[in-house]
Image (tube, coloured by chain):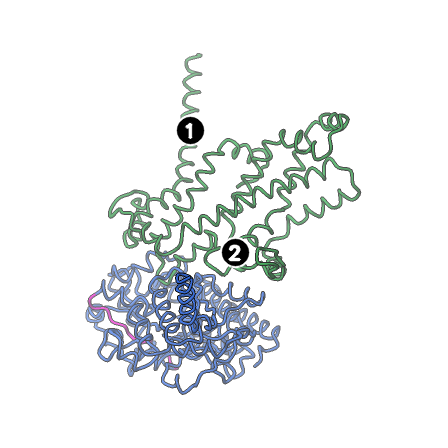
């Protein structure tokens, strides 16, 4: 009897202690980083800290391979099987909001006031998503190369003009020391094209779509500025300044480090690895082709699915995740740009005087979001194909006209995507 | 004269084998590259691609990529899933498709010609065109389990098995083979009082070794090697993912090439073992169907 009493008491105590845990509501969360050990650990730490910090919610993460993540989310939306919390690539957010996959993020916008513009997913005047980091692109160069070729160091305030940039490429080409003067990473024919190359078009004065209405690409993608951009773009490959679409991944990865390329257009996610190999690497701002020097903005962000039964719980997790300590942890581990100035000061690389601090400035001052429209997902693919075709010798005007027709047809087919 | 003829014949044979050997070497290159690269660090692997060293196990050779690949992805789980899904699907497919073929060939029922034509017509429909409607169907199907009735088949093994059990090609293989079986045997069994099911089980199936091997091989290769799009959209939890979806784990912003090669080498092992075990039947199946695996 005594034994039974002890067991019963133990069970009752166990039940009482376990009470709050049992009351926790489970929140499902999908993340795009399956196979990425570093990101997986960081996300796991945030989730673990959040789950331990309160008694209302338990977040459970399911990770997906990045290359197929969007397809999985789209399929789940069709099947009515979306999780509570989603992460999404910034430029896709308007499409997902328009399609009804995600809902406005119910958090106080004052809490994200200091975030970099590229980390905030805003559609139709409402905040839908927020990112723990941004990514930035820069012109990789060696200090020794600039010295040898007699080139001035461009800065954010005084970037190279288009003429200066081409003169730098000519000097590198004429030196005979490099296989190519400039590498653009043309083998990566995914989101890299619109992310990394549309800022060149915008610096010429063109764009993927007319942002004043978002109802046509006419004039933006095939006007005089776009034609000038197209001619310049084609010249890079036709005259042997840069490797084309058949570039091997091996060359793209090693070419700048082993000295085959004088300059490389690359993301900050390669910066840490490059610094380890190249002592005098410099990260230079984009050249200005007449309408300002620009780079792409917007990376992965968290949002709440439209079908979540617990949007307040999902928002509570996202608010928890955007603490400076986590932003800094991501930045230190992966080399990404932290979302806030205060988080940047907590990092090794982005604090004032840090080796990558220039990227924070680039993100803050040069970043231009890709077109904020649900139609972007189609426009990005059309733009990518057009640039690859032009690089491979297609007629510039015909190719851009065809791209405009395709983009406009898609916009019309979708009744203007709500613009 | 006979000596010259014999020498010529020997030379011709030598030339023929030399050409065949060269062709074999060319076809072996990708496999050799995959296996050799799986032992090299990424830097060396990429640097070697510009020379013949890419096919030689030279330089900094180690098992590090294999260790890292196992840390990056639950390879054992993925392989178990794929092997299990393949085995169950192939077993059920052979049973059901052979019954369908038997019915089309031996049973006399009205409209079978039309139905067979409709079944065969589905061969020209690419899976991508029915993926979304099929997704909507399976996401709402009921299932009776230990916990009672559940709705929706997503995130299960059955959703990766059931839609693939019946296919037109396997039925077609059985129909074609059954047509050539001697009718006298079937009629004799029927005269002796055998039921149709007995004819199927005791006469037809024991005589169908070649077509069983052909169907099993083609179906196994399809299930093991080509299951990507469907699991991608119907399986969200890692525990049920097959090996092909696991490939994506290695395509990060900085692709882990060495680990990717290690993963590919590992997942090729069951296919190579299966091929070696079924080599004769495999060659015979390609010769008899004209279908390349």
Going from the N terminus, do you reach mark 2 or mark 1 first? 1
Q: Chain of mark 2?
A: B
A144 displayed left or right of A173: left
Q: Which residues are magenta?
A: A279-291
Q: Give x and y (percent) for residue B258.
A: 33, 52
Q: Nearer the viewer, residue A20 or B25?
A: A20
* SS category of the residue bearing label 1: helix
| Chain (blue) | A
Q: Quadrant of residue A370?
A: bottom left
Label 2 sits on residue: B231
* SS category of the residue bearing label 2: helix
Taking A254 as reference, is A217 above or below it? below
Q: Is residue A164 at all visible to an observer of this figure?
A: no
In magenta segment, residue A289: yes
Q: Quadrant of residue A183?
A: bottom left
| Chain (green) | B
Main SS, magenta residues: loop
B21 displayed left or right of B180: left
Q: Give x and y (percent) for residue B42.
A: 30, 54
Q: Give x and y (percent) for residue B108.
A: 78, 38
Q: Nearer the viewer, residue A193 or A169?
A: A193
């Amino acid at each position: 009897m005594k034994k039974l009493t002890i067991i019963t008491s133990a069970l009752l105590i166990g039940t009482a202690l376990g009470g709050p845990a049992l009351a926790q509501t489970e929140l499902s969360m999908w993340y795009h980083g399956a196979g990425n050990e570093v990101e997986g650990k960081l996300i796991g730490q945030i989730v673990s800290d959040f789950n331990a910090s309160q008694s209302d919610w338990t977040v459970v993460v399911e990770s997906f391979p990045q290359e197929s993540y969007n397809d999985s989310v789209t399929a789940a939306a069709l099947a009515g099987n979306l999780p509570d919390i989603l992460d999404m690539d910034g430029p896709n957010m308007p499409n997902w909001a328009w399609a009804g996959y995600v809902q406005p993020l119910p958090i106080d916008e004052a809490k994200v006031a200091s975030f970099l513009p590229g980390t905030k997913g805003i559609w139709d005047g409402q905040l839908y998503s927020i990112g723990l980091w941004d990514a930035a692109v820069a012109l990789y160069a060696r200090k020794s190369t600039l010295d040898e070729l007699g080139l001035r160091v461009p800065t954010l305030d005084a970037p190279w003009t288009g003429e200066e940039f081409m003169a730098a490429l000519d000097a590198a080409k004429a030196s005979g020391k490099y296989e190519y003067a400039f590498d653009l990473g043309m083998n990566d024919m995914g989101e890299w094209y619109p992310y990394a190359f549309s800022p060149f078009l915008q610096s010429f004065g063109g764009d993927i779509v007319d942002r004043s209405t978002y109802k046509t690409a006419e004039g933006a993608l095939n006007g005089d500025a776009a034609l000038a951009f197209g001619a310049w773009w084609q010249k890079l490959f036709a005259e042997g300044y840069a490797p084309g679409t058949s570039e091997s991944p091996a060359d793209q990865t090693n070419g700048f480090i082993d000295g085959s390329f004088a300059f490389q257009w690359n993301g900050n996610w390669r910066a840490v690895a490059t610094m380890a190999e190249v002592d005098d690497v410099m990260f230079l701002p984009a050249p200005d082709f007449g309408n300002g020097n620009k780079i792409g903005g917007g990376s992965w962000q968290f949002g709440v699915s439209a079908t979540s039964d617990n949007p307040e719980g999902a928002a509570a997790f996202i608010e928890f995740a955007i603490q400076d300590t986590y932003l800094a942890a991501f930045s230190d581990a992966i080399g990404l740009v932290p979302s806030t100035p205060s988080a940047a000061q907590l990092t090794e690389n982005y604090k004032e005087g840090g080796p990558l601090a220039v990227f924070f400035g680039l993100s803050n001052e040069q970043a231009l979001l890709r077109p904020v429209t649900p139609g972007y997902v189609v426009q990005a693919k059309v733009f990518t194909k057009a640039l690859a075709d032009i690089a491979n010798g297609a007629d510039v005007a015909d190719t851009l006209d065809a791209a405009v027709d395709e983009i406009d047809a898609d916009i019309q087919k979708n009744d203007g995507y709500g613009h | 004269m006979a000596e010259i003829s014999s020498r010529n014949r020997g030379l011709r044979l030598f030339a023929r084998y030399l050409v065949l050997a060269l062709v074999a070497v060319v076809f072996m290159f990708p496999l050799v590259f995959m296996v050799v690269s799986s032992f090299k660090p990424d830097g060396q692997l990429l640097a070697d691609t510009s020379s013949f060293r890419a096919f030689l196990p030279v330089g900094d050779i180690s098992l590090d990529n294999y260790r890292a690949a196992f840390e990056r992805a639950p390879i054992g789980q993925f392989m178990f899933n794929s092997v299990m899904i393949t085995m169950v699907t192939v077993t059920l497919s052979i049973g059901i498709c052979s019954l369908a073929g038997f019915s089309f060939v031996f049973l006399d029922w009205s409209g079978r010609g039309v139905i067979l034509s409709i079944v065969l017509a589905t061969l020209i429909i690419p899976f991508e065109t029915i993926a979304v409607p099929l997704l909507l169907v399976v996401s709402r199907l009921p299932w009776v389990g230990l916990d009672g009735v559940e709705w929706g088949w997503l995130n299960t093994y059955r959703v990766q098995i059931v839609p693939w059990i019946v296919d037109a090609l396997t039925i077609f293989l059985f129909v074609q083979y059954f047509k050539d079986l001697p009718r006298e045997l079937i009629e004799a069994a029927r005269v002796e009082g055998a039921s149709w099911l007995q004819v199927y089980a005791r006469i037809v199936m024991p005589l169908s070794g070649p077509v069983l091997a052909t169907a099993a091989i083609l179906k196994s290769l399809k299930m093991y090697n080509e299951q990507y799009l469907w699991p991608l959209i119907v399986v969200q939890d890692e525990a049920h993912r097959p090996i092909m979806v696991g490939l994506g784990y290695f395509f990060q912003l900085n692709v882990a090439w060495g680990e990717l090669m290690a993963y590919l080498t590992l997942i090729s092992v069951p296919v190579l073992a299966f091929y070696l075990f079924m080599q004769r039947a495999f060659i015979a199946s390609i010769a008899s169907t004209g279908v390349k695996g």
